[in-house]
């Protein structure tokens, strides 16, 4: 049996699987959807493409929303975005994943982000068993 060679990991922060009901939205855009995973350094979310999106507006800030918390006006940069295959062959909706890195967070935003992560995640991506966060 061959050993698996670990790939180079770019992330500096531990990434957590988001719980149901955790959402991200890019302001002045139709990019809004469910958070897939999140860390203190960035997140990944999936959204349904709106073909009527107004591309002339600048996408300035990202907001995080859930039933228990809200974090707004986070500066970010998109580090990756790609289409997601539809599960149903009968669906005409186009879905995409967006990978975001947070930039220029102040102390308050870092604290709010840590609280959001604590309240809206279920496990570390490195853990194999689903368990609540401490």
Image (spheres, grey):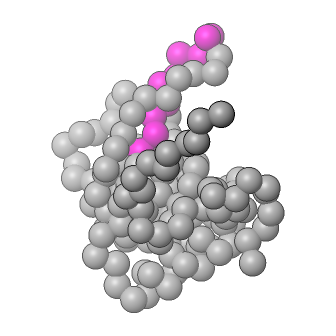
Residue 94 lies in the magenta stretch = yes
- The quadrant of the picture occupied by the C terminus is bottom right
Residue 78: tell me if it is visible.
Answer: yes
Can you tell which quarter of the image residue 30 is in? top left
* Residue 19 location (% of width, % of height): 69, 57
The one nearer the camera, 130 or 70, is 130
Q: In screen coordinates, is 83 left or right of 121?
A: left
- The quadrant of the picture occupied by the N terminus is top right
User: Residue at point 63% right, 58% down?
Assistant: 126
The one nearer the camera, 129 or 106, is 129
* Residue 130 location (% of width, % of height): 79, 56
Q: Residue furthest front?
A: 1
Span colored in magenta: 89-98
The one nearer the camera, 59 or 99, is 99
Can you tell which quarter of the image residue 132 is in? bottom right
Q: Residue furthest bottom?
A: 107
For the stretch drawn in magenta, what is the main secondary structure? loop
Residue 61: tell me if it is visible.
Answer: no
Residue 91 lies in the magenta stretch = yes
User: Residue at point 31% right, 51% down?
Assistant: 78
Q: In screen coordinates, is 39 left or right of 28?
A: right
User: Residue at point 53% right, 67% down?
Assistant: 14
Q: Residue furthest left?
A: 56
* Residue 93 location (% of width, % of height): 52, 22
Q: In screen coordinates, is 95 left or right of 67?
A: left
128 over 87 or under it: above or below: below
109 over 45 or under it: above or below: below
């Amino acid at each position: 049996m061959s050993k698996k060679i670990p790939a180079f990991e770019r992330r500096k922060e531990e990434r957590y699987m988001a719980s149901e009901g955790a959402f991200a939205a890019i302001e002045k855009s139709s990019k809004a959807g469910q958070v897939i995973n999140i860390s203190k350094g960035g997140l990944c979310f999936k959204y349904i493409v709106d073909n009527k999106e107004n591309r002339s507006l600048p996408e300035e800030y990202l907001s995080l929303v859930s039933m228990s918390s809200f974090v707004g006006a986070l500066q970010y940069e998109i580090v990756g975005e790609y289409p997601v295959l539809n599960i149903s062959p009968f669906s005409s909706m186009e879905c995409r994943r967006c990978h975001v890195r947070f930039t220029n967070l102040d102390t308050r935003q870092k604290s709010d982000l840590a609280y959001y992560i604590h309240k809206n995640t279920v496990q570390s991506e490195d853990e194999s068993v689903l368990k609540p966060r401490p």
